[in-house]
Image (cartoon, rainbow, N blue to C red):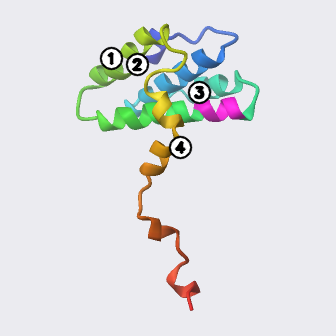
Amino acid sequence: MYERSFGTDWSTLDRESAIERAFALGVAKACGESHPDEYARVRQALPGSYDQSIVELAYEEGRTKALTLEQQGEEDVWEALVDEETKTAADSPLPEAMPGALDSREFLSRSTGPPESLDRPEFLRK
């Protein structure tokens, strides 16, 4: 799916293209199609650690969203998350799925446990 939609014959990527490809690679991974070499190339296409972190977030966001749609067929997940995102990419510098991943308030609301889980373990309390 990934190679058919994006191809792997590229030499440089701008930030937006790297984010779009990372998101698609995350979706592909969740659908059982792994491209570790391509993911490493996409990450390394951007020089700074900040941009590489954004690429990692895009990858995880794509993988997470695909896993939530897992009950549908792989082609349906790909179409819903990547093909639709690709169509709107020209209008937006980031895929629509990414701003939520970059919003710290939304990230904090996704925490897996209650705030008490940040307290000291029982054996360290007096």
Q: Quadrant of residue 49?
A: top right
Other-residue count near label 2 (Cα within 10 Å), few / some / many at <14 / 14–19 / ≥20: many
Residue 111 placement, left or right of 126: left
Magenta part of the chain: 50-55
**Camera-nearest label, 3 or 2:** 2
Residue 15 placement, left or right of 67: right
Q: Is tag 3's residue or tag 2's residue first in the polypeptide sequence?
A: 3
Disc number at residue 79?
1
Question: Could you give the CA–CA distance between mark 3 and mark 2, rounded to whole angstroms?
Answer: 16 Å
Q: Is tag 4's residue or tag 1's residue first in the polypeptide sequence?
A: 1
Q: Is tag 3's residue or tag 4's residue first in the polypeptide sequence?
A: 3
Decide which of 119, 43 is in the foreground and name it. Answer: 119
View extreme (front): residue: 105
Q: Is residue 56 above or below residue 115?
A: above
Query: Is most of the magenta stretch helix, strand or loop?
Result: helix
**Camera-nearest label, 3 or 1:** 1
Q: Is residue 17 above or below residue 63?
A: above
Q: Are marks 1 and 2 in contact (CB under 8 Å)?
A: yes
Q: Residue 47 location in percent, x, y?
A: 76, 25
Mark 4: amino acid: Ser
Mark 3: amino acid: Tyr
Q: Residue 32 location in percent, x, y?
A: 39, 31
Q: Mark 4 = which residue? A: 104
Q: Mark 3 = which residue? A: 39
Q: Mark 2 = which residue? A: 82
Q: Is tag 2's residue or tag 4's residue first in the polypeptide sequence?
A: 2
Other-residue count near label 1 (Cα within 10 Å), few / some / many at <14 / 14–19 / ≥20: some
Q: Residue 108 location in percent, x, y?
A: 48, 50
Q: Is tag 3's residue or tag 1's residue first in the polypeptide sequence?
A: 3
